[in-house]
Image (cartoon, rainbow, N blue to C red):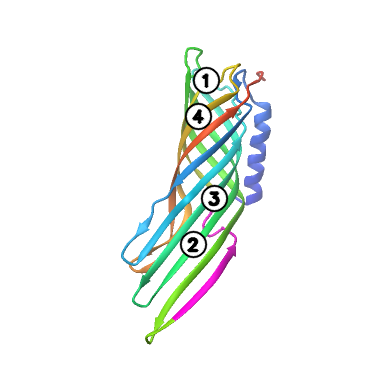
Amino acid sequence: MTFIMKHSIFTLLFLLFTSLVFSQENSMINLGVGSPFFGDTNDQIYNHKFSFPRADYFIELPALFFLNKPKDLFVTPGLRYFNFNEEISSGGGGGQSTEKVNRTALSLYSKFLINFGLGKQKSTIYYFGFISGVYLKTKTTGEISWRLVQEELDYYGHREINESGKRFFSKSYSGFIFGVKSRQKKKRFLNPGLEASYFPNFAGINTKINNYETPVTSGMANLSLTLGFGTKKSSSKN
């Protein structure tokens, strides 16, 4: 599927948000910040890690539409910004190298979720489901430096990095998400929530396998805090 087709699908989801809603009090807009976690790769000559600060920031439009009781399926589209700091170092008797880069990406996404706890007696709402997104822009900046030892002489080098982030970020990503939030009330302007998500095959990284640098895909776990602002009352459309 081409980028244009994916972009069109998510545009349609935004249109769906405006047309398929049920009578339910929700926040007008959600803001969130997440703390992503990647697996680090370390051995005697190779060290790879994602250092702090690393975060993702998102803004989304809660868009609920009723399917069947007592479960509700809702779609929440949003805009997300990833910011990762990656460090890679390796070395041995023949020299060393160190690479420090900042990877950023802007993406459009939608959450497809099943919601529980919408009964009037419930004060807490739980939801889980699927999240999928496409990248609008990616960027990698930083530097790599190295020392090479040949015939008892040291040679030093340095190179600036300023390129697309396509080698790290794929064209799209998807994963699973679970969240909990308090019920939105008419007199409450702020509504906090907590989300946990996991994205398999999220990023492409280099690691050492049998002393050879090999590109592999890495999953990402993410813990996010959300904050809903305002209260809206949407009316049903059949």
N-terminal of the two: label 3 or label 4? 3
Q: Residue type at mark 3: give it.
A: Asn
| Apparent side of residue 208 relative to residue 106 in the rendered image (left or right) | left
The boundaries of the magenta stretch are 155-170
- Identify the residue shown where x is 45% and y is 53%: 51
Whichever of labels 3 and 2 marks the residue nearer the N terminus, that label is 3
Locate the C terminus and report the quarter of the image it occupies.
Answer: top right
Q: Of the residues shown, which amino acid type is indicated by label 2?
A: Lys
Mark 3–mark 4 distance (CA, rounded to whole Å): 22 Å
Whichever of labels 4 and 1 marks the residue nearer the N terminus, that label is 1
Numbered badge on residue 183 = 1
- Mark 4 touches mark 2? (CB < 8 Å): no
Task: Residue 114: give x, y in percent of width and height.
Answer: 50, 28
Per the image, is 162 magenta? yes
Q: Label 1 to label 3, Cα distance in Å?
A: 31 Å
Q: Position of residue 109 (x, y in %)?
A: 58, 41
Instruction: Identify the amino acid type marked 1.
Output: Arg
Instruction: Estimate the spatial distance between the alpha carbons at disc 4 and disc 1, rounded to whole Å.
Output: 10 Å
In the image, is 216 to the left or to the right of 4?
left
User: Which residue corresponds to mark 2?
Assistant: 100
Name the residue at the left extreme.
44
